[in-house]
Image (spheres, rainbow, N blue to C red):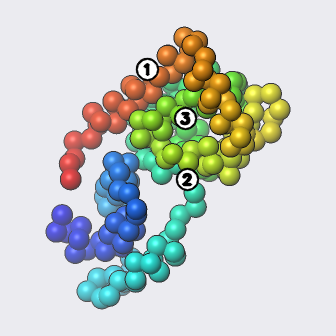
Amino acid sequence: MEEFLEEREDLVVIFFTKVDFEYHDYKALHHKFNTTEPPPNGQYLHGKPPSILQTAQETKPKQDFQCYFDSTQLNLIARHANEVHLFSADVSEEDMRKLFSCQVCKQLKARSNRRVAFFFDMLCSKNLICKQWQSVIAKHKLILSSSTDKALTTTKLSSATSDAKSTNASIYEAIRKKVQEIADCGKNDSKDTI
């Protein structure tokens, strides 16, 4: 902890100026701490770091899912997405990595808008992605509608989520169980504590 506070003021400023610091933020912080170098020339070391307000404005990331999935979780997400037929074609771990980083080269097409919406809503309910997931999907045009080949909008996603929740089909129970497995995988993989 001492090393982190003394040598990585850049990460302190980025992560501890957030309104909420949640488990996925911790995992992202831990990952960045172990895989990146401090800014050149000790930019924040022993000097006055930029004001928190200024830094928050300058480093404000584009809207994303605010999540960190490791390779095991991404593999599990891809496998489960294929098992419940979320998309019109099978997806890989790499497809899921690109989706959750909002960097898809080719949009995924929903096989069922309701299933896709319910899956993401369940990820949100387990605090694996942000509450604004519908806006993220719409803003980045990540997923095409099953019926129109147009990017899903927040309105379509909201309606699909409501429709799915009001339906008692067994597929939604299967999705719920698969998302729970993904959440449990993340807890089991985390051996580090704060």
- Type of amino acid at the residue the image marks with label 3: Phe
Distance in Å between CA atoms under marks 2 and 1 = 25 Å
Residue 44 position, x and y percent, is 34, 82
Which image quarter holds the N terminus? bottom left
**Which numbered marker is on residue 120?**
3
The tag earlier along the polypeptide, 3 or 1, is 3
Residue beneath disc 2: 64
Residue 133 position, x and y percent, is 57, 44
Please name whichever residue, 160 or 48, is drawn nearer the observer in this view of the structure: 160
Q: Secondary structure at mark 1?
A: helix
Residues at discs 3 and 2 in contact (Cβ within 8 Å): no
Residue beneath disc 1: 177
Residue at point 37% right, 64% down? 15
Residue 29 position, x and y percent, is 34, 58
Q: Secondary structure at mark 2?
A: loop
Please name whichever residue, 163 or 48, is drawn nearer the observer in this view of the structure: 163
- Type of amino acid at the residue the image marks with label 2: Asp
Image mark count:
3
> Can residue 37 be seen by looking at this rendering?
no
- Type of amino acid at the residue the image marks with label 1: Lys
Residue at point 39% right, 25% down? 181
Q: Quadrant of residue 125?
A: top left
Q: Is residue 128 left or right of residue 1?
A: right
Q: Is residue 158 above or below residue 32?
A: above
The tag earlier along the polypeptide, 2 or 1, is 2
> Can residue 160 be seen by looking at this rendering?
yes
